[in-house]
Amino acid sequence: MLKKSLFLFCLFVSVSFAQVNVEKEKEAIKQADIEFSNLSVKEGFHKAFLAYVADDGVLLRPNSYPFEGKKAIEELYSKSSDSSYTLTWKPSFADVSSSGDMGYTYGTWELKVKTGGDKPSYGTYATFWKKDKNGNWKFVLDTGNDGLGK
């Protein structure tokens, strides 16, 4: 019994003092953001957003109340098509909490109309991330601004 108690105590202490490699997690969250953008190109940004949103995720969009929760975001995207344009983005910066389970990215985005006639639109964004129960990064808040000149 004493050996079992000592083992459990040592396990608890080692887990309690486990260090999170913050630099590694910064790269992981940045990579998740890049993969999110890549999926937007491959499958369309609606599918990408639905794949990366947490169940309680929120979208903040201009001239609109927040879209709160995955179901509200699914409903939003069911009313429109994203087949006539491509949305891509690139994170410029990422940071994570010392516990390694929350973080944020920000960067720039580009929207191209597929007909080719219009000039692309550009802007900035910020995405706040949280790890899900499986250790995958999902966004809990996403917002962006347009008007970045290029």
Image (cartoon, rainbow, N blue to C red):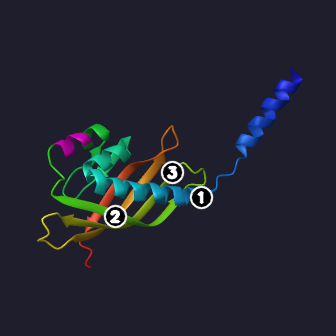
For marks 1 and 3 on the same chain, the one whose residue lies earlier in the sequence:
1
Front label number (3 vs 2):
2
Q: Is residue 76 above or below residue 123?
A: above
Disc 1 on helix, strand or loop?
helix
Q: With 32 as the anchor, is 144 left or right in this view?
A: left
What's the amino acid at mark 3? Met
Q: Position of residue 37 (x, y in %)?
A: 35, 58
Marks 3 and 2 sit apart, C-alpha to C-alpha, by 20 Å
Q: Is residue 25 left or right of residue 14?
A: left
Q: The C terminus appears in which quarter of the rendering?
A: bottom left
The residue at the point 30 percent across, 62 percent down is 88
Q: Give the SS element for disc 2.
A: strand
Q: Which mark is residue 79?
A: none
| Mark 1: few/some/many CA within 10 Å (<14, 14-19, 20+) | few
Of pointers 3 and 2, the one earlier in the residue sequence: 2
Which of the pair 14/40 is nearer the observer? Answer: 40
Residue 89's disc is 2
Answer few, some or many: residues within 10 Å of disc 2's Cα (few below 14, many 20 plus, some between 14 and 19): many
Residue 50 % position (x, y)? 31, 44
Q: How many marks?
A: 3
Location of residue 10 in the rendering, given as x and y in whole percent from the top left corner: 80, 36
Residue annotated with mark 3: 102
Residue type pointed to by label 1: Lys
Q: What percent of the width, then of the height, locates residue 98?
A: 60, 54
Q: Residue tagged by mark 1?
A: 24
